[in-house]
């Protein structure tokens, strides 16, 4: 794997050119360019805020900021995986003719989305400081760590998905369905505190459910984004049945460490898997 | 072996052909219910050994399916041989087929950069060679137009222009000269002759025996993955044509 990484480093200019090309192609024929990719999360969050505040009766100050803090990393996860699933297959003619480290194709898709995510985060901070008027927490210093490990997780999954999709084109459909289901298993539209207080669980099971839920590294990373970026909240739900108030839970550092370790493992395994199959791509008829 | 550009020792390539197409979920599910998926192995190259020296122009000939493209792919390091050893000494530039590697939404200029980098140039080197590339492609006034708006001949010229300006030591051509108009073919042939004078190595696959006689000094005839003949282009081509004639007679 060290040799593969060294070869990848030798081809860093190709990787960078692919990233730029991806960004350029995406906005070539549109006037608003990058703002299109902001409009999707902003509109989604606006709709979610209205529905959850007015219809479902959640009482949380600055709900939209909390949704955005998890929705932006989720968008990064989702679009990067969807983009990279097609990345090798889309260039199969080139792969059949020219030598280059094949991993640049999925990695370029991931990096292009990372740049988007970075820009979206800038907009998020403008929104947070300017509109919401929330103070910047010292824990924001941890944000780069979360971004790095999330990127490792995404890169590892992308390597596996893009490789499988060359041999089995069903992969991209499975990924897209999987992402749609996964959206409900990560804390974006609800809070991890609500998982802890899930009504089906008896008190002694609460802790276990919370734990198992967060063994999914992407779920834990989303919880961590919220806790790092925004002050703790009190979730108050004016539910159909009764009015409940959930106290905020502190960041579980142990679980975060597990999530980061898992992300690293996914990257290493994903890269090993990709390397094992990457010279078969050109043989695919 | 210092003057060798390419050495192949006992190279074999087996492709796996599955009769049940395995590239879909349906294929996988079906294969579970059959007792065993039959995997047939097709030997595209069978114990090929050859040495190509720097500065040689070698024509690869043979009937359809004889393994020529497979051999080029192995030299280009795009596929790995099943057995045997391969040494390639020098920078390889495959001449790409029409439009491969181009993005239709990007301009000619942007595509030059991408293609140059994928063929191993740095940004700096491309910037230096840009005027020459654009002039060779005769696309000065179209260079900021998206490639989508090019005619196929223009795409071909652009791709060829980039490839020949990457300063390759070894040039691989798989029937690329067959496309393109008369004038373009002439230009390509002139460029090949220039390469030959500069001492570059060229391996070209062609079904045009006159072309092989004209440009190649040596020819290698592949048949069913084996080297049938390897030597002076004239003799090997004659030998091959005789063989082809006999085959034709038999089938009548
Ligand atoms: N990706 C692949 N998977 C399975 N079999 C393949 C693959 N590529 C080529 N083959 C088989 O290997 C043999 C050699 O193919 P190759 O493309 O090298 O022939 P060729 O000499 O270039 O023929 P042509 O003159 O038609 O271009 C053929 O029988 C072909 O069916
Ligand atoms: Mg061929």
Image (cartoon, coloured by chain):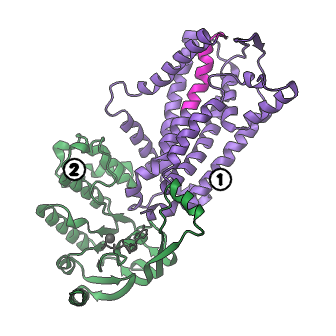
Chain colours: A purple, B green
**Residue A67 part of the magenta segment:** yes
Marker disc for residue A269: 1
Mark 2, secondary structure of its residue: helix
Which chain letter goes with mark 2?
Answer: B
Residue B35 in the image: x percent, y percent? 60, 68
Residue assigned mark 2:
B134
Ligand 1 sits in quadrant: bottom left
Quick check: A206 left or right of B161?
Answer: right
The image quadrant that residue A251 belongs to is: top right
**Residue B173 part of the magenta segment:** no
At horizontal 28% and vertical 83% (from top left) the residue drawn is: B219
Instruction: Estimate how packed mark 2 is, as few (under 14), some (14 to 19) or many (20 or more) residues with alpha carbons within 10 Å.
Output: many
Instruction: Estimate how packed mark 1 is, as few (under 14), some (14 to 19) or many (20 or more) residues with alpha carbons within 10 Å.
Output: some
- Name the one closer to the observer, A142 or A181: A181
Determine whether B71 is above or below A47 in the image.
below
Marker disc for residue B153: none
Determine whether A41 is above or below B226 in the image.
above
Q: Residue furthest left?
A: B183
Q: For the residues marked 1 and 2, what is the alpha-carbon distance in whole angstroms? A: 44 Å
Residue A56 in the image: x percent, y percent? 63, 13
Residue A271 in the image: x percent, y percent? 60, 53
Write down the region rendered in magenta.
A57-75
Can residue B127 be seen?
no
The quarter of the rendered structure image containing the C terminus of chain A is bottom left
């Amino acid at each position: 794997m060290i040799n593969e990484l060294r070869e990848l480093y030798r081809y860093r200019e190709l990787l960078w050119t692919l990233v730029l090309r991806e960004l350029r192609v995406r906005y070539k024929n549109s006037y608003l360019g990058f703002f299109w990719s902001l409009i999707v999360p902003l509109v989604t969050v606006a709709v979610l805020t209205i529905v959850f505040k007015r219809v479902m009766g959640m009482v949380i100050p600055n709900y939209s900021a909390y949704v955005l803090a998890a929705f932006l990393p989720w968008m990064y996860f989702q679009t990067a995986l969807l983009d990279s699933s097609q990345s090798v297959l889309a260039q199969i003619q080139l792969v059949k003719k020219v030598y280059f480290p094949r991993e640049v194709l999925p990695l370029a898709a991931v990096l292009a989305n990372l740049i988007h995510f970075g820009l979206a985060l800038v907009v998020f901070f403008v929104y947070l400081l300017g509109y919401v008027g929330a103070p910047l927490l010292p824990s924001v210093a941890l944000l780069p760590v979360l971004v790095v490990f999330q990127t490792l997780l995404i890169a590892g999954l992308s390597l596996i998905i893009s490789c499988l999709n060359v041999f089995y084109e069903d992969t991209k459909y499975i990924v897209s369905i999987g992402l749609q289901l996964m959206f409900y298993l990560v804390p974006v539209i609800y809070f991890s505190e609500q998982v802890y207080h899930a009504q089906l669980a008896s008190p002694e099971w609460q802790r276990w459910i919370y734990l198992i839920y967060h063994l999914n590294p992407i779920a834990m990373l989303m919880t961590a984004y919220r806790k790092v970026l925004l002050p703790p909240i009190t979730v108050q739900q004016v539910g159909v049945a009764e009015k409940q108030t959930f106290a905020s839970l502190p960041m579980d550092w142990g679980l975060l460490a597990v999530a980061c370790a898992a992300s690293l493992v996914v990257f290493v395994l994903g890269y090993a898997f990709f390397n094992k199959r990457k010279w078969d791509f050109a043989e695919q008829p | 072996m210092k003057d060798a550009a390419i050495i192949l020792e006992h190279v074999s390539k087996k492709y796996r052909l599955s009769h049940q197409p395995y590239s879909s979920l349906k294929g996988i599910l079906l294969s579970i219910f059959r007792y065993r998926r039959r995997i047939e192995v097709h030997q595209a190259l069978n114990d090929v050994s050859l040495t190509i020296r720097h500065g040689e122009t070698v024509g690869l000939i043979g009937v359809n399916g004889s393994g020529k493209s497979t051999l080029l792919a192995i030299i280009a390091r795009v596929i790995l041989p099943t057995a045997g050893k391969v040494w390639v000494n020098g920078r390889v530039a495959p001449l790409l087929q029409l439009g491969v590697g181009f993005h239709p939404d990007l301009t000619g200029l942007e595509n030059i950069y991408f293609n140059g980098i994928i063929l191993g140039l740095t940004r700096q080197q491309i910037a230096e060679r840009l005027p020459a590339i654009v002039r060779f492609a005769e696309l000065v006034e179209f260079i900021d137009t998206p490639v989508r708006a090019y005619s196929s001949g223009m795409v071909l010229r652009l791709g060829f222009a980039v490839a020949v300006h990457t300063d390759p030591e070894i040039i691989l051509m798989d029937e690329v000269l067959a496309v393109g108009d008369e004038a373009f073919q002439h230009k390509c042939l002139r460029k090949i002759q220039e390469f030959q004078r500069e001492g570059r190595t060229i391996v070209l696959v062609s079904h045009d025996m006159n072309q092989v006689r004209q440009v190649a000094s040596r020819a290698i005839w592949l048949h069913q993955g084996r080297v049938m003949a390897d030597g002076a282009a004239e003799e090997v081509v004659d030998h091959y044509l005789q063989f082809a004639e006999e085959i034709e007679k038999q089938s009548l």
